[in-house]
Amino acid sequence: MQEYEVEVSDFGQTHAILTKLGFALSLRFEKYRETFTYQGAEIVLDEVPFGTFMEIEGPQEAIRAMVTALGLDFDARLVSSYVDIFDTVCTTYKLPATDITFEAFRSLAIDLRACQLR
Amino acid sequence: MREGYETRIAATPGKGAARLLICVTVKELLRDLLFREAGQAYFKRLAVPRQRRWLSAWRTLSTYQAEKQLLPVGGRDTNRLIQQFFTTYACLRAEFHDGGMPVTAIRVLRLHCPALNAALERIHCLECAAAAQDVYHVLLLGGPRLRRQCSSPLLPSRFLKGLDQEGNTRRPIGHDTNIGLRKNGRLRI
């Protein structure tokens, strides 16, 4: 699947344009992201409503080198998408949440280790 | 001491406190302020000091502009952007309507101002300014409803004293220690 990104200056107007074009809201997903670049790899720290994650993007060898430099276990990495993780969390905790918003997860303590993520 | 600023604050029944926070903490504070609290009904506006002050000391800065300048989408190079912002503007102020923002609304304030929570339940005005390299001064005004609000920006150079090893202060510093101490028509300093 190809991902296209563009920055919009007005959220409300953009939402209205997309609605007029026939698109409907299927999932709302909030996250805070901070991006770092180091030796050919992009390291992304994401805080999402159910936890905090790190993504490493770049050529395979740069990712491997970064994982080693950070002392991480490559085999323990997650390959699931955030939406998949969200579904697993909701199933594990029997949550009625339909959107990935901080409001939906407010006052919930999620232990991702209990979710057996892959 | 800048005359006018202290007098006007002290004449209100509000309380205040100041903290020195490191860049990472300020980033978290700004993030919660811009992306969450700015959407709340009690949020009034963001403002930066006006250079020519014959209109008013502050001019409104839209949250969109603030986000774009401080924490743009993708979160690249945010430390430098924050530093640059506070080089361009001496101070960033968030104002809240009467009733104010609960001090417990923002995690940073909950964590870094435990003593403050009891004394300052509602924030009416929050000001942030650079104090030193990667250290920022945050001034909070709140408590009961303010009749009048402060109208001049911070002077960052005043806020370096009282910084501990973690970049926090243990007590209110600077002019705000006098806030709310009006007694028998005189200011106790």
Image (cartoon, rainbow, N blue to C red):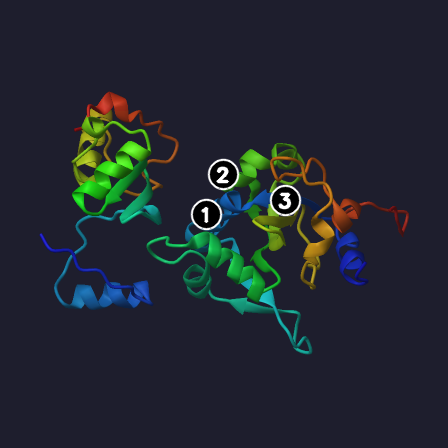
Across and down, in percent, residue A117 comes to 19, 27
In the image, B154: left or right of A116? right
Front position among marks 2 and 3: 3
Q: What amino acid type is highlighted by mark number 3?
A: Leu
Q: Which residue is mark 1?
A: B32
Q: What amino acid type is highlighted by mark number 1?
A: Asp
Q: Which residue is mark 3?
A: B20
Q: Residue at x 17, y 68 (%)?
A: A20
Residue A69 visible in rendering: yes
Write down the chain letter for disc 1: B
Considering only order in the chain, which callout, 1 or 2, is on the residue closer to the N terminus?
A: 1
Q: What amino acid type is highlighted by mark number 2?
A: Arg
Considering only order in the chain, which callout, 3 or 2, is on the residue closer to the N terminus?
A: 3
Query: Residue A15 versus residue B26: which sits nearer the camera?
Result: B26
Considering only order in the chain, which callout, 1 or 3, is on the residue closer to the N terminus?
A: 3
Residue closest to the far left: A1
Residue density around tag 2, few if under 14, some if 14–19, many if 20 or more, within 10 Å: some
Locate the N terminus of chain B and report the quarter of the image it occupies.
bottom right
Query: Residue B183 versus residue A43: which sits nearer the camera?
Result: A43
Residue A43 in which image quadrant? top left
Q: Residue at x 27, y 49 (%)?
A: A40
Across and down, in percent, residue A88 comes to 18, 30
